[in-house]
Amino acid sequence: MRVWHSLEEVPADLGRTVVVIGNFDGVHLGHQHVVGRARELCDAGPGLRLVAVTFDPHPMAVLRPEHAPQMLSDLATRSMLLRAAGADDVLAIPFSREIASWTPQEFVERVLVGALHARHVVVGANFRFGNKAAGDVSTLAESGLRDDFDVEGIPLDGGPQVWSSTYVRTCLAAGDVEGAAEALGRPYAVIGHVVQGDRRGRELGFPTANIPVGQVAVPADGVYAGWLRRLDEPGSDPYPAAISIGTNPTFAGERDRRVEAYVLDRDDLDLYGAPVEVSFVARIRGMVAFEGVDALVETMKGDVEKTRELLKA
């Protein structure tokens, strides 16, 4: 897969393409269905490549940064997920106020016609584009008649709640990782490099891998059953893990929110500096401030057993 970070990076000799357009944050099932339909069109036409057009950063981060959402995936993860869904290449347009000022026709001429030589364009039925979101699917179809590309708008799906990135974020904010997984078609996961923590978990008998929260969305504070997978060991099996999210309220003075994953029954893993994926299967409980360490340890033992039960590990 090629990931182009500007229109100028797109090869001049790129042939005709099938194009999907969207923020694709999280690449949920609705996104996957759009890409899947585009893949069908691509496979039916000789020599076509499927290009996913996305934006980095999120347009809201530029236009209304105070209202910008926490992202469900960074660009690298988004590109990986789009590839898994069927895309051949990704064009990540560096969003700016200048690009926001383009009319719908300017967007079509510069991106779809000039750079990507689109033959088919597939978008969600609620797709809007161009300055002040003036363009929609019908606008795009009119442009296609003039510029020799077909347009297909895919109805929004999901139910009873329509799948969307906003819906996934709402589920995560409530700790409903199962609802998020249903919309995503996979467990929600965060990716990062393990950093050294205060080693308090090791002192309590539960050594944890600490992953900084960063700018991506994470589930609500609490304890979860899930999996930890090393990304620097392709093909390796994931480890069952009890995962804590929060600020460790039992210990005064701790304020940094963090993701801490305890790999069940393992105290021999050297994970410092390793890139890992931590995925969430089910919520066990909310975050609690305990009166003492003994009560915390007993509860953590129960969390581990519940994790083992949920994961059948």
Image (cartoon, helix red, strand yellow):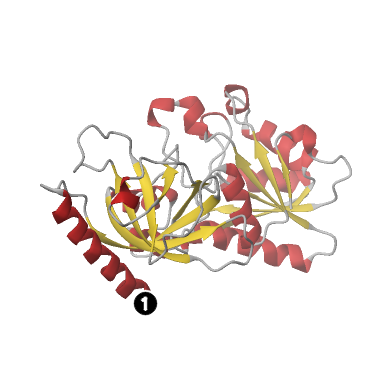
Which of the 4 image quadrants contains residue 54? top right
Which quadrant: the C terminus? bottom left
Residue 125, x across and y down, in percent: 52, 53
Which residue occupies the foreground of this view, 115 or 270? 270
In this picture, is 64 found above or below 303? above
Q: Residue furthest bottom?
A: 312
Residue 215, x across and y down, in percent: 45, 37
Describe residue 312's horizontal placement relative to residue 15 as left or right: left
Q: How crowded is the residue under tag 1: few (<14 C-alpha within 10 Å), some, or many (20+)?
A: few
What's the residue at 24%, 59% (across, down)?
300
Q: Residue furthest right?
A: 13
In this picture, is 25 found above or below 302? above
What's the residue at 78%, 36% (across, down)?
9
In this orientation, does residue 155 appear?
no
In this picture, is 249 found above or below 64? below
Q: Residue furthest top?
A: 98
Residue 129, x across and y down, in percent: 57, 38
Describe residue 205's horizontal placement relative to residue 210 as left or right: left
In this picture, is 185 found above or below 195? below
Describe residue 103's horizontal placement relative to residue 111 as left or right: left
Which residue occupies the foreground of this view, 243 or 116? 243
* SS under mark 1: loop
Instruction: Give the residue type that dot 1 points to.
Output: Lys
- Residue annotated with mark 1: 312
